[in-house]
Amino acid sequence: MQKSPTRKAQRGDRGPRESGKPAIAQEVMRMAHVRIHEILPEEVHDLNVMCVPPGVGSDEVSRLLEESVSAQRRAAAMGARVFGAFLGGEPVGRVEVMPIEAAPLPLEGDGLWVLRCLWVLENARGLGIARALMELALKASGHARGLAVLTYPDWMPVGFFEKFGFTVAQRSDPGFLLLRAGGADARVALVQVARDLAPSAGEVKVEAVFNARCPWIIHYYRTRLALARSISDKVTTAEHVIHTRDEALEFGEENLYIDGAPVFSGPVGLDDFESVVRERLARKGLL
């Protein structure tokens, strides 16, 4: 899903776990049995288990977690910070913030930070977790010129962020690019990346552009690529794993692309995806 679905400045202060730095990394909030704190790179595995898709076998779970943890550590080296919420010891919420250069989104802007993936599991909602995570994200990015976030109607809706001073900087159907400006000169824009729209007449090309920090995202895109390949030998596939803004500016936003064009505006089920690929094959006389 485009939870984001699409990205290197000096890392912010990490707290007492690193000698001589302030205490954000040790910031802990308690609400009943909820514990919220910064997730260090070596702890990411414990948080990412909340993002494993249901029904996935244990071997695949291990691979998804290993790949997502590796991507998170790479992001951390570029300044990204992650905060997690735990209820009864189980992960139930998360938020990521990072310098714009480390965000896997095709954005223009200087001196900004970007918020990605503010998510609370349904069984933990109503406890104030989202607000607490948001406040930590704002504190971690407080030194930046502004904080940007790309939202969607069913994923991190605009109304929540407006409560924290965000305003709409750009409409990106079906989403909104929001900015919480730290000064009058703060600007952000979502770049529409030009892609090759002249595919071969003898094939249908399906591409997936995604970031690997989330196990769910990895599994979502790869299952659809595998399905596309199974439909016909006239389907070719490619995946582009993006880690940074520069890579997003090269390949575009996280999405599925068919013959170079983004066909879906959000998550698509396997049946609907297969129907679109078959329709494209039929249109080209390949099925």
Image: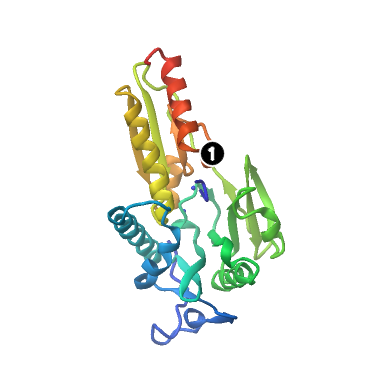
Look at the image and tell me in which quarter the C terminus lies.
Answer: top left
Q: Secondary structure at mark 1?
A: loop
Residue extending farthest to the left is 59
x 61%, y 62%: residue: 146
Lateral position of residue 122 relative to residue 246, left or right: right
Lateral position of residue 174 relative to residue 159, left or right: left
Residue 236 seen:
no
Residue 14 seen:
yes
The answer to whether 114 is drawn above or below residue 172 in the figure is below
> 40 or 146: nearer the eye?
40
Q: Where does the image place residue 243, in percent across and percent down from the top left?
A: 39, 53
> 167 or 156: nearer the eye?
156
Please count the marks in the image: 1
x 50%, y 32%: residue: 272
Q: Quadrant of residue 14?
A: bottom left
The answer to whether 189 is drawn above or below residue 185 in the figure is above
> 118 or 150: nearer the eye?
118
Residue extending farthest to the front is 55
Is the residue marked by circle 1 packed among few (<14), some (14-19), or many (20+) residues within 10 Å?
few
Q: Quadrant of residue 283?
A: top left
> 22 or 263: nearer the eye?
263
Look at label 1 and name its amino acid: Gln
Residue extending farthest to the top is 285
Q: Where does the image place residue 176, in percent across and percent down from the top left?
A: 64, 48
Instruction: Name the residue tied to disc 1.
Output: 192
Q: Where does the image place residue 100, in percent across and percent down from the top left?
A: 50, 58
Q: Where does the image place residue 226, in percent across and percent down from the top left?
A: 34, 36
Which colour style is shown? rainbow
x 30%, y 57%: residue: 58
